[in-house]
Amino acid sequence: MCKLLLYSFTIYLHSLAERLESKRNYNYTKYHPMEEIYKWMEDVERGNPELVSSSVYGLTFEERNITLLKLGLENPEGREKKAIWMDCGIHAREWIAPAFCQWFVKEILQSYKTNEKLTEMLQNLDMYVTPVVNVDGYMFTWTNESNRLWRKSRSLPPSDCGCRGVDLNRNFNANWGTVGVSYNCCDNTYCGTSPVSEPEAKAVTDFVGSRLNQILCFLTIHSSGQLILLPYGHPEISAPNYDELVAVGKEAAAEMKKVHGMDYTVGTSPQVLYKNSGSSRDWARLVGIPFSYTFELRDKGEFGHLLPEDQIQPACEEAYAGALSIITFVHDKAFNNVTTVPNAAVTTVTGITTVTGVAITIWSTIMAFSLTTGVLM
């Protein structure tokens, strides 16, 4: 019996040593290929079973796993939990985005036991974090230098075109195909043959769509430009809670500036960047998730999507401050009845005044129908 106990204890110590060694060896200030990210996810789950679990919720075009980490603690009162969604790496070349998702998980793991507020939030919220959505494209950018700036997925083209891949952030069913897209499969903003034609977009849509009564906030991480974007990408549509989204976004930008002095601009994509349609951010708000943002991380053009590794840490530190600011507000509004913007915005959409998502949904359906059928309005 004593030998058995000693053997079990030895195995435990060996396992603990392996987990500690893995944590020490993983460098969060370096970019990692997909194989290392998969291994990191396994190590994080194995080393933190009380907080972390994983789930494969889809397959890419090339049949690779799309995997998320779920961070959450049991609610001590048995109350129903809500959730936060975060995804990174929907555009293959934006390496700082997956680096941030890994950094975000690291920060949660290192601080939740000593941070009472974070513990409270993890007891009330599950955080679904996908480090890389576009796994095929991300892996392609690691193959050689000439492929480093590949943006799209790696799906096969239509029969009448010869270029692979779809811009996954133009493939969601939110005013799909209306503005800021291309129907030429060789262009970087090619939106696909139909809404949610791509398995990666379908995986996100199915997982999030089955939890709409649970998910309060949708954060999708990109680069570059130092922006916090809110719905919608279509210039003639405004979110019903536009004022609140702006206020919460500006508070996040203020928190980000405190870290390293970097300015992040807040607004809709047409206001501060360009018009677009079919984004995951817009889809999330359109289906009823009240808070939906795109983070465009560093920088403002000097390096673009080739952000040097020596900027990973500062970029992730400021992004963490911004994300945590939004998540904290969303949590406190849901569970502590705290709000800094009590009145939803009344917006006018092509002559329709609305305080709900109904008119927006109708307009989205009409616009999508008109373009896909060739009936222009």
Image (cartoon, rainbow, N blue to C red):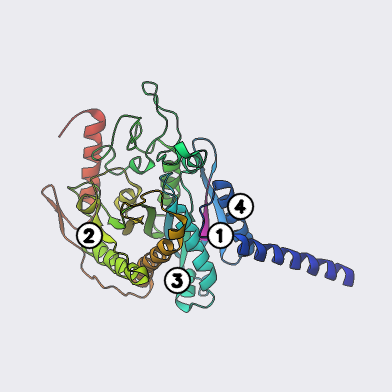
Q: Quick one: label 2, few (<14), some, or many (20+) residues within 10 Å?
A: many
The tag on residue 27 is 1
- Residue 229: image x %, image y %? 29, 55
Most prominent secondary structure in the magenta stretch? strand
Type of amino acid under label 2: Tyr
- Residue 212: image x %, image y %? 39, 55
At horizontal 24% and vertical 34% (from top left) the residue drawn is 369
Report the Cα–Cα distance between label 1 and label 2. 39 Å
The tag on residue 121 is 3
Question: Is 151 drawn above or below residue 156 in the view shown?
Answer: below
Residue position for label 4:
39
Lower position in the chain sequence, tag 1 or tag 2: 1
Lower position in the chain sequence, tag 2 or tag 4: 4
The tag on residue 242 is 2
Lower position in the chain sequence, tag 3 or tag 1: 1
Q: Quick one: label 1, few (<14), some, or many (20+) residues within 10 Å?
A: few
* Of marks 2 and 4, the one in the foreground: 4
